């Protein structure tokens, strides 16, 4: 039940010949049928690594050739694009690392790639420092995650309690927060190939749209103790947007059903276009495909056999029909979670436990 993060190309109304004679400005159209941008400001990426902007209230395609040469109309600044298709940073401040050892920054409210040569950066020492910080974990299993943050960060969670509701899903699609530029984070949410390895190309096309980027199988729930679990979810929070919730963590205190009083900390990795206000869709293998099915492609099976489209498996016995890597999360649902349906909860933002960040590679800055 997810929002699939591929930029929608806005259809343009054809201009009739009677109107066209009054138009004095020529419009150049790109290979996707959309107008070419006059500037070089990137606001999104396509699944085919095309770059997109937003001008005059409509989507436009970036002319990478013109922008690389600094000849785009309306702009006097040269924009250089790196090997991943993202703009190169003007500065040298590192905010995250890619799975292929690339270094990333955050400028003009979007992700950019660090020019290690120009910045004279010792890549080996940077990566060693990053790996050291991301692998640290707290021994505490208390319901408060304030003591288990993965590393020092200036980010301060919003301590506001709200009431919400939960549902469940597992569609195997690339999470929305796996695309760069969504929020000020250390790195995008990890995605995995069909074989289960973490992808180096953060621009790899969504597996639900013919690409090779899928939800990683370790982004499933697990119990810390009888009263606390960790996991991941898609979300829609009233008054907020992806820039607020991508890679943020929230602590649930369930208020009804057989798990009332239990707590769960989830990291938001996805956005639910079909979710209501203060609604979290918890990622549970076998919990129902929802709107999209990337599982059939990822695992080479007929995932429609994994229970109802919405709701998923009806009994724990069905967990044995899932791929081995997904079975622990399925059993969690019928064990710790007591197979309850759509429990309500009170929730508040908390610091992300190191154990969660270690699975997604993403933390807020």
Image: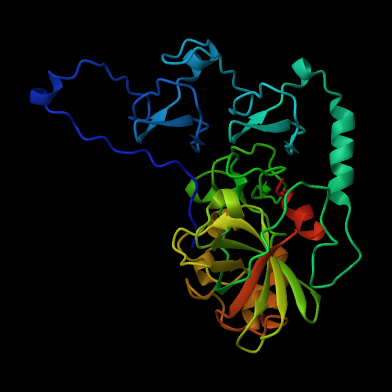
Looking at the picture, the colour scheme in use is rainbow
The quadrant of the image that shows the C terminus is: top right
- Whether residue 349 appears in this view of the structure is yes
Q: Up-down: is 114 above or below 261? A: above
Foreground: 117 or 349?
349
Q: Which residue is rendered at x = 71% and y = 32% of the image?
A: 104
Foreground: 210 or 102?
102
Q: Which residue is rendered at x = 85% and y = 35% of the image?
A: 127
Q: Is residue 102 left or right of residue 43?
A: right
How far across and down, in percent of the image, does residue 166 sit?
A: 56, 73
Q: Up-down: is 134 above or below 267? A: above
Q: Up-down: is 51 above or below 323? A: above
Q: Which residue is rendered at x = 57% and y = 74% of the image?
A: 163
Q: Which residue is rendered at x = 52% and y = 71% of the image?
A: 305
Q: Is residue 356 left or right of residue 302?
A: right
Q: Is residue 188 left or right of residue 147?
A: left
How far across and down, in percent of the image, does residue 135 sit?
A: 87, 50
How far across and down, in percent of the image, does residue 77 sit?
A: 54, 14
Image label count? 0
How far across and down, in percent of the image, does residue 57 sit?
A: 35, 35
Would you identify the image quadrant in which residue 96 lies? top right
């Amino acid at each position: 039940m997810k929002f699939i993060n591929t930029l929608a190309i806005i259809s343009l109304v054809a201009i009739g010949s009677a109107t066209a004679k009054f138009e004095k400005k020529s419009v150049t159209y790109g290979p996707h049928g959309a107008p070419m941008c006059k500037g070089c400001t990137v606001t999104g990426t396509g699944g085919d690594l095309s770059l997109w902007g937003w001008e005059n209230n409509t989507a436009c395609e970036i002319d990478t050739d013109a922008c690389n040469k600094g000849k785009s109309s309306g702009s006097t600044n040269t924009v250089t694009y790196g090997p991943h298709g993202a703009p190169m940073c003007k500065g040298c401040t590192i905010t995250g690392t890619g799975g292929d050892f690339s270094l990333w920054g955050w400028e003009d409210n979007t992700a950019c790639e660090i020019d290690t040569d120009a910045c004279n950066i010792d890549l080996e020492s940077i990566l060693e420092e990053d790996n050291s910080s991301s692998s640290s974990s707290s021994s505490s299993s208390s319901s408060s995650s304030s003591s288990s943050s993965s590393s020092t960060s200036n980010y301060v969670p919003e301590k506001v309690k709200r009431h919400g509701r939960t549902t469940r899903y597992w569609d195997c699609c690339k999470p929305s927060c796996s695309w760069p530029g969504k929020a000020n984070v250390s790195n995008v949410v990890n995605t995995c190939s069909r074989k289960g390895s973490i992808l180096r190309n953060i621009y790899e096309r969504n597996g639900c749209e013919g690409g090779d980027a899928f939800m990683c199988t370790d982004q499933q729930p697990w119990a810390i103790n009888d009263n606390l679990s960790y996991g991941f979810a898609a979300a829609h929070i009233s008054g907020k947007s992806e820039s607020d919730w991508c890679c943020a963590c929230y602590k649930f205190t369930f208020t009804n059903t057989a798990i009332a009083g239990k707590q769960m900390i989830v990291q938001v990795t996805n956005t639910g276009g079909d979710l209501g206000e203060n609604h979290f869709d918890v990622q549970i293998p076998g919990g129902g495909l929802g709107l999209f099915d990337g599982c059939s492609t990822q695992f080479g099976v007929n995932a429609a056999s994994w229970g109802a489209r919405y709701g998923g498996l009806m009994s724990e016995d069905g967990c044995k029909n899932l791929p081995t890597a997904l079975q622990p999360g399925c059993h969690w649902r019928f064990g710790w979670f007591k197979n309850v349906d759509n429990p309500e909860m009170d929730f508040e933002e908390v610091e992300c436990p190191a154990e969660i960040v270690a699975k997604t590679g993403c933390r807020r800055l």
